[in-house]
Image (cartoon, helix red, strand yellow):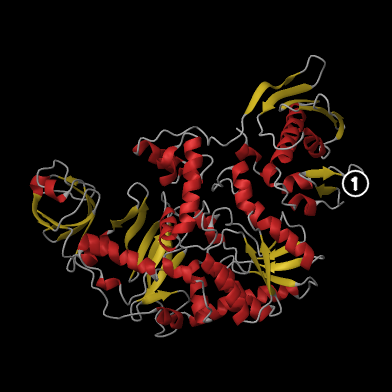
Amino acid sequence: MAHFEHGKVGFRWCDTCGTLVLGAKCDVCSSPGRRFEVSKPGDLRPCMGKSLDVLVGVFKKHFGYADFLRNRTVFFNKVAGEDRTDEIVFQGLVIGVLRYDLKACDFRLDLRLEGALLLRPLATKGVVTVGHDTGHLKGKSLPGKAITGVQGDFQEGDPLIVVAGNLICSAVAKVPSDRVLEAEKAVGVRDVGKGTIEVSKKRSSWTGFVNANENYLRALEGKGVSDIRSFIGNNKLPVTLSFSGGKDSLACYGLAMKAAPEAALIFVNTGLEFPETVRFVEDFARKNRKRLLVADAGNAFWEQVGSFGPPAKDFRWCCKVCKLAPLTDLIEKNFPRGTVTIEGNRAFESFARSTISFVERNPFVPNQVILNPIRDWRAVDVWGYIWWRNLDYNPLYEKDFERIGCYLCPSCLESEWRSTAEIHPDLHARWDSHLKAWSRKNGGGDEYVKLGFWRWKVYPRKMRQLAEEVHLRLPEVRSDRLDLKWVKGVSPCLTGGYSAEGVLSVPRKRDFSRVVEALKTVGQVKYSKEFEIALVKTKDSTLKVFGGGQIVATGPTPEKAHAIFEAGAKALLRAQLCTECGICLRNCRTRAIRLDDGIVIDEERCTRCGKCTEACVVAHYYDKLVT
């Protein structure tokens, strides 16, 4: 979790070689490098391919000059923002922030002081000159009457360089250039400094970056290989490598081929992969003569999206249906005793992964042990290693994609979604039309989709603020959530104990007999087919579930009454929204579950351990599905 605290983290830059130094010193010139700081968590990554073209275009647009970015090693550092937001690291300086503006559907540049000092002698536009009697400048809004010169046209919100005598300021336009001289608040000054920063004459490349950090990369590899060998040396299970087609799994491939060269590659084809990714994985396995096992989800996503609605950052039901379900099936068929799988999970990727360990068990795939050898690597470490080992990588990384996954994933950025529209308009159009139809049906409209609100079940603060700015009315929760109405909350019963009563509105997709089957995992069941009533008894509690969604629970304590009520609600959900993914079946140690238009329970085998409920995609997202 320390990775995600607010604050700064230090790196070092070799001015002699013009590149980032990751180890104790530059391996080319032996310089320890100059320290500089970026915002935490500091997961630096190279700016390359189309990403560099985007950056060059933004600087060219605002300041008329961007050649200084070419033939140099430039890095991005992801920071918090409503969509893509990256600090720009150039010459060991944070010269600005590149962010994707959801309202404008375009990139914007926030210029830092270092960027203003560097660009002042180079810029041919975006420069404003003011008089000497402006007083304290930092954080000040300057009136038009203080401006003595304007170089080039600009729009409201554009970055500017302000020159006040021997002072240089990073600033932002409060009004367009044609109104700047008359405005009361014309320019907002952000930071102030003196002098200039020269662009280094030393050109640099990614090859130079690798050469400067070879010893560091060798040490990273050595530790990763050693960690893998130390575990598999005492383990008799076959070793596999999760190979998604992304950079992190590619780095793990480099480690695995030294620690366990016999490892087979496992690729989960979710049915939502970019065509480039599928081709890359197949070609890579063939070129390197590796056994490739493919877990294919087929059309599972499109078959289930009508039931669950679009996936969201906080409701990724698709991962279980399209990834875990086919993966559990593949492992059971090919590795009945289980497997040790090397995966490219990194702590810097997200808060949820910030505490991952080297060895973990997949909670949804009981016979899979996971090794995370690059858990402490940053993105820049991964890329340095890939280039050092000369590993072929997915061509999508040259198309301004930070991450490679399902093309319609809610966790991808709107800026990446724009890139998807450019390279695969057919895929983009299919999902976009589906989202808009779903949004219109539920009262959201096209703007709701355009601004990316569909990506959340429960809207975070930043999205609520965006809705206020664009005057978009949001429902309190997403309209595809199911409604739970309490008839009577947990309260004392006249006959003793406590009771809870409510009605859960669930779309009826299966006969009530399938609800009865799911309830068998809760307790002993008696069932009236005629009246569609199921009575469930446990050691100390009782539960009634009706075909219309009514649930009545009683227990000796408020906690137990609530627990059995929730167990009944989850069983009702599981039965009606079951995707038949089979994850619950494979998590049942007594083999008490089979699938037949939903789950069917063998009561003689069922121990009511709860493992099937814990593994179920529907039960797992109970809090997200039910209001």
Residue beneath the point at 73% across and 72% down: 239
The quarter of the picture where the N terminus appears is bottom right
Residue 93 visible in rendering: no
Q: Residues within 10 Å of mark 1 (few under 14, many from 20)?
A: few
- Residue 543: horizontal and vertical position, in percent? 80, 28
Residue pointed to by mark 1: 605
The local secondary structure at tag 1 comes to loop
Q: Say if 579 sits above or below 230 in the image.
A: above
- Residue 352: horizontal and vertical position, in percent? 58, 53
In this orientation, which residue lies closer to the viewer: 627 or 546? 546
Residue 349 visible in rendering: yes
Q: Say if 237 sits above or below 508 in the image.
A: below
Residue 539 in which image quadrant: top right
Instruction: Name which residue type carries label 1.
Output: Arg
- Residue lying at the far top in this picture: please name it: 494
- Residue lying at the far right in this picture: please name it: 604
